Image: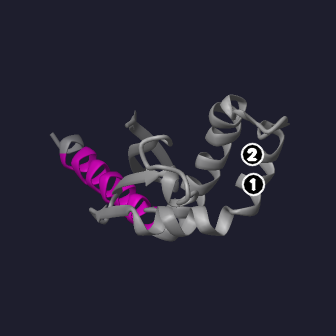
C-alpha cells in the first residue's frame, strides 16, 4: 500500500511537468503569423501559380512565385489582421480567413479564392485541423 501514494506523487509531478512544458512552449501569435505566411506562400506557389493565365502572350506563372516572395510582408500583415487567437495557456487555437483579393484589389473579389484555416498551436508547433477554400 505504500507504493500507491508514491505512484500518485510521481504521476502528479509528471502531469504538472507536462503542463508547465505546454505553457512555456505555447506559440505566440507572431510565431503563428510567420508560420502561416510561409505556408500560404508555399501553397500559392504549388497550387495557384501553376493555374495562372496567360495574359497578352506573357505567362503569369513565372512571375507568380516571385510576386508571392516579394509581397511576403503584405501577406503577413493580411494574416495578422485576419487571424483570431484563443489562448488557453497550455495551447492556442488560431482561426484565419485569408482572401487573395486583398493582395490584388484591382481584380473582382469573386475571381480570386479565399481560404479559412483553423489550427492549434502546442509544444511550439502548429497543426492545421481545418482548411477550406471558399
Left or right of 87, for residue 126: right
Quarter assignment of residue 48: top right
Tell whether label 2 touches label 1 (CB within 8 Å).
yes
Magenta span has 11? Answer: yes
Task: Name the residue located 83 percent from the left edge and 40 percent from the top edge.
Answer: 62
CA distance separating discs 1 and 2: 5 Å
The residue carrying mark 1 is 67
Q: Is residue 115 above or below residue 96?
A: above
Q: Is residue 25 above or below residue 51?
A: below
The region drawn magenta spans 5-25
Dot label at residue 59: none
Q: Secondary structure at mark 1?
A: helix
- Residue lying furthest front: 56
Task: Name the residue located 39 percent from the left edge and 54 percent from the top edge.
Answer: 96
Task: Name the residue located 55 percent from the left edge and 58 percent from the top edge.
Answer: 106
Left or right of 55, for residue 110: left
Residue 28 visible (yes or no) = no
Quarter assignment of residue 115: top left
- Residue lying furthest left: 1
Pick the front one: 52 or 55: 55
The residue carrying mark 2 is 64
Magenta span has 14? Answer: yes
Amino acid at each position: 500500500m505504500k507504493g500507491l501514494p508514491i505512484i500518485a506523487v510521481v504521476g502528479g509531478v509528471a502531469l504538472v511537468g507536462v503542463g508547465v512544458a505546454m505553457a512555456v512552449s505555447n506559440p505566440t501569435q507572431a510565431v503563428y503569423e510567420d508560420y502561416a505566411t510561409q505556408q500560404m506562400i508555399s501553397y500559392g506557389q504549388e497550387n495557384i501559380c501553376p493555374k495562372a493565365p496567360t495574359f497578352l502572350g506573357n505567362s503569369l506563372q513565372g512571375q507568380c512565385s516571385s510576386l508571392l516572395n516579394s509581397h511576403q510582408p503584405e501577406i503577413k500583415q493580411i494574416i495578422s489582421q485576419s487571424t483570431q487567437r484563443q489562448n488557453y495557456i497550455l495551447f492556442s487555437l488560431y482561426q484565419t480567413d485569408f482572401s487573395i483579393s486583398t493582395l490584388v484589389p484591382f481584380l473582382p473579389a469573386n475571381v480570386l479564392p479565399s481560404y479559412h484555416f483553423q489550427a492549434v498551436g502546442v509544444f511550439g508547433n502548429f497543426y492545421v485541423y481545418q482548411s477550406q477554400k471558399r
